[in-house]
Amino acid sequence: MTLERIAELKKSRQAIILAHNYQPPEIQDVADFVGDSFELSQKAAGTDARVIIFCGVRFMAETASILSPDKKVIIPDNEAGCPMADMITAQELRKKKREFPAAAVVCYVNSSAKVKAESDICCTSANAAKVVESLEARGIIFVPDQYLGQYVSTQVKKDLHLWEGFCPVHSSISVDDIAQKRAEYPGAKVVVHPECRPDVISLADQVLSTGGMCRYAKEQDFDRLIVGTEVGILHRLRKENPDKEFIPASPKAICPDMKKITLEKVLFSLETLSPEVKVPLKTRLKARRALERMLEI
């Protein structure tokens, strides 16, 4: 009944449902698009939908609002946040900019709209090195993920000033986790997310964004793959590649915020068109410019 009602309301509201790769399986299955955060916002902006139901965390819904100001953006649970995004505020970033006035600010998209608005350019986990390398400035303030920043620093010749933020889920994946899984599944390849700690990254065969992991799974020939990221992605990987085996590097790599959204909350959002996420005009315009600069590269 819930699924039928969601389908009915989606049609009558001219809505689309977006689900991040880390969402619960039933949310991914009801979505029109499943993907990483920025990819989803771009897809939504390219549709004629009037309403976006964003099943993810708040900064993702904010990005959708920035790119689609003419659409109503709804997040089914307004308490679904991101601990890493909350590790920096716009005020703290302004202070950091005063410390390094000649540095350019590169902001990972996993951040609030206000922090994006204080940044020169945004990046994703997939294009972070390319973005940093493209800038004329020698000094780079990289926020908020120190581990993604450290990974980027191994690929570019820049002076990176790293904010000490991190993803609690990815930082929980340990060297011991990787070693144990390699012992259990000899010969299996290991892919990890660049938000992981440097010692974990050093043990991986590939370091990939969630979108990169999905493409790797489709394109590469293997029987088993050890996956070092939030476990929600395993549903999509298994669904799209039923002939391959996917093993979580750590079954404890679960984001509580990503699991807050339920089918009942999706239905309620469609019924009430709330809670709405709307980025104020001044912040939206400045944040959008940082995102557009990334797309220009």
Image (cartoon, helix red, strand yellow):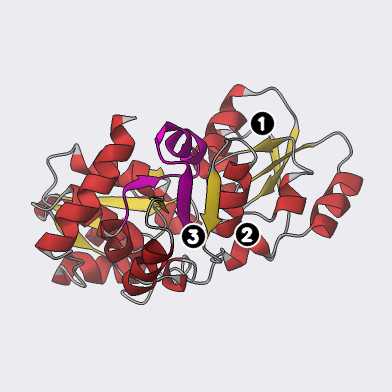
- Three-letter residue code for mark 1: Asp
Q: Residue at x 60, y 43 (%)?
A: 153
Q: Earlier in the sequence, mark 1 or mark 3?
A: 3
Camera-side mark, 2 or 3: 2
Residue 164 appears in view = yes
Q: Which residue is mark 2?
A: 170
The residue lying at 20 percent from left, 48 percent from top is 67
Residue 243 numbered mark, or none: 1
| Count of residue discs | 3
For marks 2 and 3, give the CA distance.
18 Å
Q: Which mark is residue 25?
A: none
Is 288 positioned to the left or the right of 214 in the image?
left
Name the quadrant containing residue 135: top left
Residue that badge 3 annotates:
24
Q: Quarter holding the C terminus?
A: top left
* Residue 185 as seen in the image, left or right of residue 122: right
Toward the viewer: 254 or 284?
A: 284
Q: Secondary structure at mark 3?
A: loop
x then y, percent, for residue 32: 31, 44
Q: Is residue 123 left or right of residue 180?
A: left
Q: Are marks 2 and 3 in contact (CB under 8 Å)?
A: no
